[in-house]
Image (cartoon, helix red, strand yellow):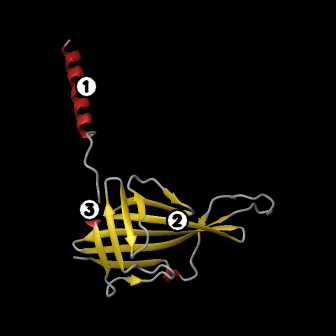
Amino acid sequence: MNLAMTLSAGVVLLQTLVLAQAEIRPAIEFQSLRGTWTLDETAGRGRIAGLEAPRTLKIATTATEISVVRDSLDPETYRLDGADTAFGDTHRIAMPVADALALTTRRTRSRGGYAFTNVVTDAFSVRGDVLTIERRLSVVLQALASPDSRTPGNYGPGHLVELEDPNNERQTIVYRRSR
């Protein structure tokens, strides 16, 4: 009888501990990213041809998404639950990585029987009033037809390709918080 009561009490205690740990916690809203940021042209390094750093960023966050306005362009919206969002041939995803929030954009174009997907990842991190973006450009190549060129459609998995200029794949961009 004592053993049964002790086991029952242990099960109840364990359930209480599990439920207490599973309680819904406040959402991470990446509040440190919010605001208007101005490019610090004296800082940073590298350059990716065709991907100019915007002079200003306006960032807004909620519990479910982050919105980034680069200069005066339309906002880019990323869901914070890790889900992919698609706008035509552009796909966006946000994921926390180490001490940063990585915003990745994929755009695919076809040419000569191949699909080329540009993958641009911007890892946003903030220290005080300094926003640093570590940018990386990758290209994924996938054949669109079978080797005998008679069967259309995707054929096999894609693979990362080396860029012609390896200095064209990484960039560090630094912004200062505007007051």
- Kindly identify the amino acid type of the residue bearing the numbered disc 3: Gln
Q: Residue at x 59, y 72 (%)?
A: 161
- Which disc number belongs to residue 75? none
Who is closer to the viewer here, 156 or 43? 43
Kindly indicate the quadrant of the structure image that contains residue 11.
top left
Measuring from the top left, give residue 173's x and y in whole percent. 37, 78
Image height of 26 relative to 87, above or below: above
Q: Is residue 88 above or below residue 138?
A: above
Q: Which residue is mark 2?
A: 106
Q: Amino acid at mark 2?
A: Arg
The residue that disc 3 covers is 31
Of mark 2 and mark 1, the one earlier in the sequence is: 1
The percent position of residue 125, horizontal first and vertical second, equals 31, 69
Q: How many marks?
A: 3
Q: Residue at x 72, y 68 (%)?
A: 113
Please name the residue that numbered disc 1 is placed on: 11
Quarter residue 28 falls in: bottom left
Residue 85, image x, y percentages? 48, 57
Q: Residue shown at 57%/75% (left/top)? A: 162
